[in-house]
Amino acid sequence: MKKIDIGANAFVYPMPVTLLGTLVNAKPNFMALGWITRVNANPPMVGLGVGRHHYTCPGIAEAKAFSINYPSAEMMQVTDYCGMATGEKVDKSSLFEVFYGKLKTAPMIAECTLCMECRLVQTIEFPTNTLFIGEIVGSYAEEICLADGKPDIKKMDPLLLTMPDNRYWSVG
Amino acid sequence: MKKIDIGANAFVYPMPVTLLGTLVNAKPNFMALGWITRVNANPPMVGLGVGRHHYTCPGIAEAKAFSINYPSAEMMQVTDYCGMATGEKVDKSSLFEVFYGKLKTAPMIAECTLCMECRLVQTIEFPTNTLFIGEIVGSYAEEICLADGKPDIKKMDPLLLTMPDNRYWSVG
């Protein structure tokens, strides 16, 4: 085996593909997000690394809430659009059927297989990105994507992403 | 479509499977880690949510460094062992061939397809987990896993994990 030095800008292989839902200027907005992980077990908390230039950022800061939504592989095209088009220029509020849970400022996507609503608990600034920490206060799954009451990844058929080649994959 | 409330303890679908390498009491130790994401674009930084009870945690704090290693699907058994057996009770230092890069306190795994060495830059405490933030200072890929000089996920054949069912998957 031979290791090649490929520099410092390595990624997580693969990344999940989620749609980050926010209210920005009182309108639902959605961006594609792969930089997400659970950060705490109890209570359940997630962390999102979002580029500071994104239209989404002031929305999270103001609403103090956001949602994480899992598109299925068949939603690849609209998901990709949400990742390419900024809410600054296009209105993404009517791309999906929106619903709300306990929080009234975390718009969730009815078409997605699993949606999590999160209350913002902390914001940590890094040089180019903001790390938003949210507590999951509720999650909602498509009935047909559950097995024994738990999300079944084969039924969810989520998208995966790799960087820097920016290609989508599915779970094998 | 019908959404079912499945409670707050939702996960990221799917999670990558990595091996987190540390020096603990001057000996290499490796734990399985799925709670990881990039958190900053430039410089490249990752965040890891590690349960505070893990043997790994004081090692990162002392060495101020760690590594992230990607096992291939054929390394599933030894990866699972690293996730089940604590370094407190078993010596995992000789499970792999270890090598070092720029940092002398971030042991990396020669058998893995891609290894990243990280300098600890920040530690954030949550109720049950510690979020370690590291800057990637170097990464090293198997020559046969590269395409155009970049990691090719089909060649890497990395493992995926789902919770709470704790099952492994591959990229399709």
Image: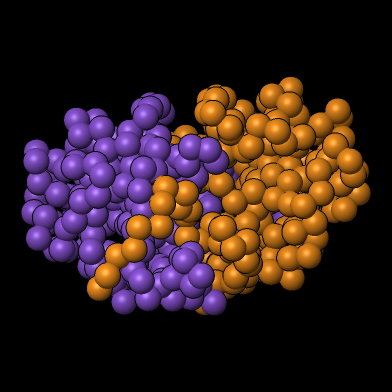
Chain colours: A orange, B purple
Rendered view: A72 above or below B105: below
Please give left or right for residue A12 compared with residue A17 in the image.
left
Q: In the picture, residue B60 is in which quadrant? A: top left
Give the quadrant of the N terminus of chain A. Answer: bottom left
Q: In the picture, residue A80 is in which quadrant? A: bottom right
Q: Is residue A132 visible?
A: no
Residue appearing at x 65%, y 53% in the figure: A18
Q: Is residue B23 visible?
A: yes
Rendered view: A119 above or below B82: above
Residue appearing at x 50%, y 61% in the figure: A14
Please give left or right for residue B170 compared with residue B102 in the image.
right
Q: How many marks?
A: 0
Residue appearing at x 31%, y 47% in the figure: B117
Q: Nearer the viewer, residue A15 or A157?
A: A15
Q: In the picture, residue A167 is in which quadrant? A: bottom right
Residue B160 percent location from the top left of the image: 44, 65
Please give left or right for residue A43 compared with residue B1 in the image.
left
Q: Nearer the viewer, residue B143 or B48?
A: B143
Residue appearing at x 59%, y 71% in the figure: A170
Residue B39 percent location from the top left of the image: 51, 39
Rendered view: B172 above or below A82: below
Residue B92 percent location from the top left of the image: 13, 56
Residue A64 percent location from the top left of the image: 68, 25
Q: Nearer the viewer, residue A115 or A142?
A: A115
Q: Nearer the viewer, residue A5 or B3?
A: A5
